[in-house]
Image (cartoon, coloured by chain):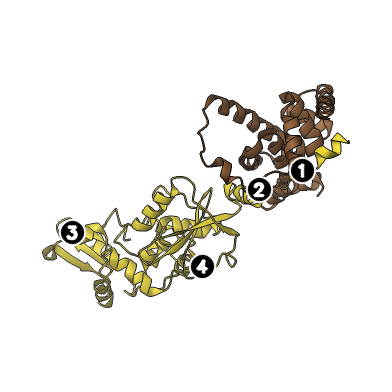
Chain colours: A brown, B yellow
Amino acid sequence: MVMEQLCDRLASDLDSAFDDLVGALGDDVYSGLKRMHGDDAADLTQETFIRAYRALGGYEPQRIKDLRLRGWIWTIALNLGRNHVRDRSRRPQPVELHDVHSIADPEPMDEALWQARLDALPAAQRRAVVLRHVVGLSYAEMSAALGRPEGTVKTDVSRGLTRLKKLIEEEA
Amino acid sequence: MNIGSSLGSLRTELPGSTRDAVRLGTGLMDGFSLFDSPIGEVVVGFNIRGVSFVDLATDFDPDASLRKAVAATPPKGWEAKIDRAIERGRPGDLPVDLRSVTEFQRTVLEVAATIPFGEVRPYGWLADQIGNRGAVRAVGSTMAKNPVPLVIPCHRVVRSDGRIGNYSLGGADNKTALLGREGVDIERLATLAARRVRFLGSDTTHVFCLPTCSHARRISDAHLVELKSAEQGVAAGFRPCKVCRPA
């Protein structure tokens, strides 16, 4: 669905259009957060959309029509992700004794390998690479979501890719 | 190796359970859960805005309900509130989501929610309270459409002729059972109605009440005065009770 049409529908009837927003951007948000935050992605995605819904409820229709949805939703998701990491580091995590056995659906080897490579990147580069190549945001959308100039974002992406290339060469 | 396309293949679909969690969390879909009630097991629907429907477990069909609903656990702390609301027959601190009814119906239901445990009010009383004396029929159909029976006690709204009236949650027998459990003397109400007695007054306080008002129940037989109309009461020097607001 074209994002502008979705904006118009959200502006005129939030409740009937919101589920389509989740349909249009849910895979994006979940895929990206999964690469950044692993198993917490489902909770973070849920919270991202609930906050988006609340925010839209308080916006004037014109403001909703003018939204760049993809970049906007990622502003929320990245913020939540940042807070989540900060809270985690402050609070000791409970030990889950049964955790090893409860993994029902182990990742395919290839996916685990890529995840390990992404995890080896510095945070800013990992974020940039994931948003650009897993989620598929444009540089303009990334710039809006990250609150950083396009040039900086491009640099992070290209440095991240260079680093990934190097990691792969070292594996060989 | 093309790194870009390899990374692209890491895209994953949003799990259905997360999508449902968003629908629940925004109030766009209801969750439901089973609860005990004085008239048997009931299904209680809820979303983040409040409790949205109550139905007998035996009558419930999630696919037939107006809005989508999935089996779910109520928000934290709500189970005790729902139990309490059903037990006492009033919402209390339990939020209620009345988006499924009209503005008029919401107003009527909000008044019905204030009828105390163990007391009943005629349909006409509700119409009076919302300032629309002629709306008795609309009040009746609002009770029939009450999405949250038990929590909003539409079973405490009865006919003024002493008959108990219909009940949407499994019929009049359940209404009788609920009122009996609350100690309402249904036979006495019918007897009074048959003699056209609408209000009970006290010749010491000169206040008159609806028959089930807690103040009317305190009047001793020696001081009890039966009244057939508010006019008769006023003429005899009585004033209406400020609690049950009989007229």
Q: Three-letter amino acid code at disc 2?
A: Asp
> Label 1 crowding class (10 Å Cα cut-off): few <14, some 14-19, many 20+?
many
Q: Position of residue B59 (x, y in %)?
A: 49, 70
Same chain for the residues under marks 2 and 3 in the image: no
What residue would you read off at disc 1?
Answer: B11
What residue would you read off at disc 4?
Answer: B60
State the CA–CA distance, disc 1 to disc 4.
39 Å
State the CA–CA distance, disc 3 to disc 1.
72 Å
Name the foreground residue: A108 vs A10. A108
Q: Position of residue B5 (x, y in %)?
A: 85, 39
Q: Which of marks 2 and 4 is in front?
A: 2
Residue extending farthest to the right is B1
Occupied quadrant, residue B197: bottom left
State the CA–CA distance, disc 4 to disc 3.
41 Å
Q: Three-letter amino acid code at disc 1?
A: Arg
Occupied quadrant, residue B171: bottom left
What residue would you read off at disc 2?
Answer: A105
> Label 3 crowding class (10 Å Cα cut-off): few <14, some 14-19, many 20+?
few
Q: Which of marks 2 and 3 is in front?
A: 2
> Label 2 crowding class (10 Å Cα cut-off): few <14, some 14-19, many 20+?
few
Quadrant containing the C terminus of chain A is top right
Same chain for the residues under marks 4 and 3 in the image: yes
What residue would you read off at disc 3?
Answer: B218
Q: Which of marks 2 and 1 is in front?
A: 2
Q: Considering the numbered disc 1 on the image, is that residue within a helix, a strand or a loop?
A: loop
Using the image, determine if residue B21 lies above or below residue B35.
above
